[in-house]
């Protein structure tokens, strides 16, 4: 397991008055620090510690998002009225509904 493959983020926390380090794959972990660099170092250390504890206890360790494979397909349920409206807009643009929705999602 390569800990560098996890998705880390550092942001400012107005409530705490410090930078907060986060890891998407471990949503219960965070690390507060005065600088972004220290927040990143702290959350990386917290993740490493959590992974070690999980390994020691035989728990399943989250796979990094970056290492997952994606098919490019997912199902979205919408009300029939929205489905109809999207189909009309796609037809007006002369493209498939799939292409229309994909373009809207990526915008």
Image: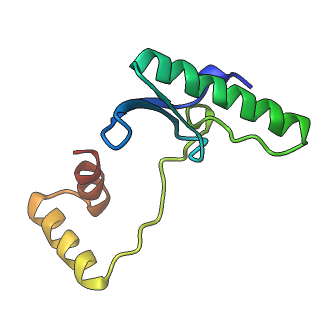
39 on left or right of 94: right
Taking depth in this image into account, of 95 and 103 the one nearest to the observer is 103
**Residue in view at x 90 percent, y 42 percent:** 58
Q: How many labels does the image show?
A: 0
- Quadrant of the image for the N terminus? top right
> Residue 14's quadrant in the figure?
top left
Residue at the far left in the pictured view: 92
On the image, the x and y values in percent for residue 21 come to 48, 31
**Residue in view at x 9 percent, y 64 percent:** 92
81 on left or right of 39: left
Decide: is 70 above or below 104: above
**Residue in view at x 23 percent, y 83 percent:** 81
On the image, the x and y values in percent for residue 10 come to 41, 29
Residue at the far top in the pictured view: 37
On the image, the x and y values in percent for residue 107 come to 21, 45
Decide: is 7 above or below 95: above
**Residue in view at x 32 percent, y 82 percent:** 79
On the image, the x and y values in percent for residue 19 come to 39, 29
């Amino acid at each position: 397991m390569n800990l560098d493959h996890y998705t880390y983020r550092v942001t400012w926390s107005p409530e705490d008055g410090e930078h907060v380090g986060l890891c998407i794959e471990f949503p219960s972990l965070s690390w507060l620090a005065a600088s972004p660099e220290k927040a990143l170092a702290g959350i990386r250390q917290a993740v490493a510690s959590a992974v070690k504890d999980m390994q020691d206890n035989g728990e399943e360790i989250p796979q990094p998002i970056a290492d997952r494979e994606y098919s490019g397909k997912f199902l979205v349920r919408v009300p029939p009225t929205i489905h109809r409206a999207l189909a009309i807009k796609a037809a007006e643009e002369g493209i498939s509904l799939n292409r229309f929705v994909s373009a809207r999602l990526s915008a």
